[in-house]
Image: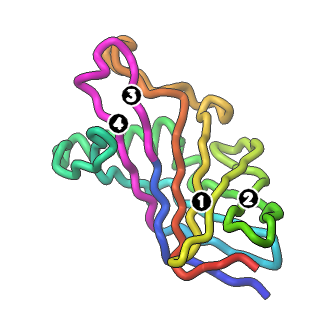
Amino acid sequence: MTRRLDQGEISLLTFKEGLLSRVAHDLRLKVGGWRVEIDEDEVQAFIPVDGIRVEGALKGGVLDASALSARDRATIETTLQQELLQGARFPEIRVVARWSRRAPDRDDVGLSGTLSLRGQERPFSATGRLRSGGLELTAMLRPSLWGIAPYKALLGAIKLQDRVEVHLRLPGFLPA
């Protein structure tokens, strides 16, 4: 029997680097419109590229939702969705994975499988913990593995690191 989940939160963290990185921002992005389907031990996640929105800048690891203007947010979202992720051509990011085994006396869980991004499939894994409120998973992605070069501005003086941290929180969910 397939269970469909669409309650919870997916957030993405991006990180700056470069000569002028002090004037740039680490960002937290929030994903809307996603869904997860679980059938036995297989997990499929469907993430619409146009559902990725800028939530705000991270300053010392803390979200500052007012650090960016509405115009800056719109520019970042357009660049991300249209240029970097090529959303018109590849409107959905997809994960197909299986739960990895966990020791019966521990709350550690994992997923391993593939992530399809911009028409390319690559291995994917996430680790997490069962909490009293549900499941929390984290994955580290290197966008260059899917052909996405780190974004650069001002002739490379500002650029993003080749890593995106993905956080998934599913309240009330416990894997079988």
Is 22 magenta? The answer is: yes
Q: Return the mark for residue 26.
A: 4
* Disc 1 element: strand
> How far is the residue under mark 1 from the one under mark 2?
9 Å
* Disc 3 element: strand
The residue at 33%/43% (across/down) is 61
The residue at 55%/82% (across/down) is 172
Task: Please name the amino acid that badge 2 sits on.
Answer: Leu
Mark earlier in primary sequence (4, 3): 3
> How far is the residue under mark 2 from the one under mark 4?
26 Å
Indicate left or right for 8 with 47 as reference: left
> How far is the residue under mark 4 from the one under mark 3?
5 Å
Mark earlier in primary sequence (2, 4): 4
**On screen, residue 135 above or below 151:** below
**On screen, residue 41 above or below 14:** below
Q: Return the mark for residue 84.
A: none
- Check disc 2 and report the residue beneath it: 111
Indicate left or right for 35 with 96 as reference: left
Indicate left or right for 60 with 132 as reference: left
The part of the chain drawn in magenta is 13-32
Q: Return the mark for residue 16.
A: 3
Q: Are marks 4 and 3 in contact (CB under 8 Å)?
A: yes
The residue at 35%/36% (across/down) is 26
Q: Are marks 1 and 2 in contact (CB under 8 Å)?
A: yes
- Check disc 1 and report the residue beneath it: 137
Task: Please name the amino acid that badge 1 sits on.
Answer: Leu
The quadrant holding residue 136 is: bottom right
Mark earlier in primary sequence (3, 1): 3
Mark earlier in primary sequence (3, 2): 3
